[in-house]
Amino acid sequence: MERKLALYLLFPFVFFTIVKTQHDNVCLRPELAANIQMDGLQRFYSPGAELALSCKQGYTPVFGPRKIVCAASGEWTKTKIMCIPKQCPYPDTLSNGELHYEDTVFQSMINYTCDEGYTMFGNSSAVCLADGTWSTPVPECKAVTCDLAPIPLFGMIIYEKRIRGNTVDFGVGGTYKCNPPYIVVGNARAECTVLGIWTKTPICQVVTCPPPENIDRGYMSTSERRDYNYRETVKYGCSGNYVLEGSYEIVCQANGNWSEKPSCKAPCSVGIEKARILYKGKKIWIEDLTPNSVLHNDIVSVYCMDKRRTCGYAVQTQCIDGNLKIPECFERPRAIDYSLYSSSLPSEITQC
Ligand SMILES: *[C@@H]1O[C@H](CO)[C@@H](O)[C@H](O)[C@H]1NC(C)=O
Ligand SMILES: *[C@@H]1O[C@H](CO)[C@@H](O)[C@H](O)[C@H]1NC(C)=O
Ligand SMILES: *[C@@H]1O[C@H](CO)[C@@H](O)[C@H](O)[C@H]1NC(C)=O
């Protein structure tokens, strides 16, 4: 305040003129629409004064005069000038990548991303500058590559594509082979991954299986107690009326184990007396089944009585490894019925 007063005292003339002109029609410093600027810092303008308007950096003027004049009324002449943001050129597309942007005007931003398996070379974003150009050129997305695949001892790889130079693009793979008698242990196929490294490399090994073991109630095609090589086979059989279940041949596998051995399944005796059975499509009296033995998996039917309707019906049962379950509906006939009235047995009467 003191200082202001001092100024007035020092420059009474200046002070006087300002106060005086305020009573006349002067123009006040104009209020400008967005992004418009003008020269000068004055607060008051006399009638007749001209003011040049321009756009802020990054904006282009459109419409109307760019000059306003202070009229005698103390109003500025009208202008429809507008400043619109500068336009940057539409960006080039990015091969193996994507552009993300909302607009292409001053201060807009483009973000670039590369597809999976591609690495970016250059700047991942660009901004539209005040001069209408992008701040950085479009980056490049280059495929991730691997060095050539590692080769195991005694082995080789056969690429599924022709390889140029000393790198392999991601996604390209190959198949490993080993020189006999070595075999590939692990995954024979390998691939260059998006991380730029190969999937696990297999190894080349000589594979053997231990001497094969015999099976219960059976025999083997060999009695040699030695290690067997990969893919060698041994056959099995069952003694007597035992039935072989599984594969009759086992093979020495790449993991050094034999494939699954078969087993021998026991025959069954049909545990009923004094009745007829249905076996292999024939109705026979049980005492005529000699010996009383059916093979594993064989199907036998016994006859039951439907008491309400007084008719007979066959019920199936199966021999499973020495076990043949007699259906619960089967009734042992009384000796007298069997010898004197055998025609009244469920197997002999009308069938339901
Ligand atoms: C570009 O990336 C920046 C920074 O991660 C983010 O703020 C902006 O929203 C992104 N713009 C677009 C258009 O994706
Ligand atoms: C990308 O460009 C921006 C702006 O030009 C700059 O600040 C930044 O350092 C650049 N980044 C890279 C990784 O080049
Ligand atoms: C080989 O068989 C043994 C015994 O059954 C088992 O423990 C082992 O895991 C098998 N080896 C391979 C490589 O499968």
Image: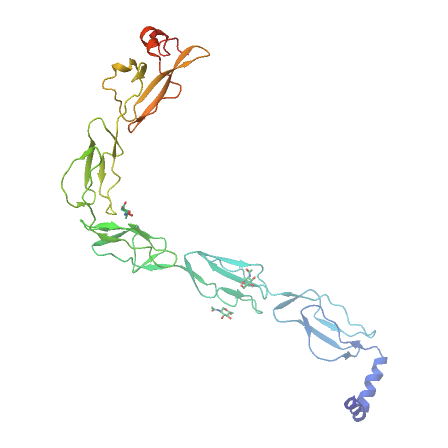
Q: Residue at x 21, y 32 (%)?
A: 217
Q: Where is 77 relative to 192, above or below? A: below
Residue 247 versus residue 324: which sits nearer the camera? 324
Find residue 60 and report its image quarter. bottom right
- Residue 346: x and y in percent read 37, 12
Q: How many labels does the image show?
A: 0
- Residue 5: x and y in percent read 80, 90
Residue 291 relative to residue 130: left or right: left
Residue 275 relative to residue 225: left or right: right
Q: From the image, which quarter does the C terminus lie in? A: top left
Q: Which residue is drawn at 83% across and 82% down?
A: 21
Residue 179 relative to residue 344: left or right: left
Residue 287 relative to residue 343: left or right: left
Q: Residue furthest left?
A: 224
Q: From the image, which quarter does the N terminus lie in? A: bottom right
Q: Which residue lies furthest to the bottom in this view?
A: 10
Looking at the picture, the colour scheme in use is: rainbow
Residue 331 versus residue 266: which sits nearer the camera? 331
Q: Which residue is drawn at 76% across and 77% down?
A: 49
Q: Where is 309 relative to 204, above or below? A: above
Q: Where is 139 relative to 156, above or below? A: below
Q: Where is 125 relative to 45, above or below? A: above
- Residue 202: x and y in percent read 27, 53
- Residue 72: x and y in percent read 82, 75
Residue 219 versus residue 158: which sits nearer the camera? 219
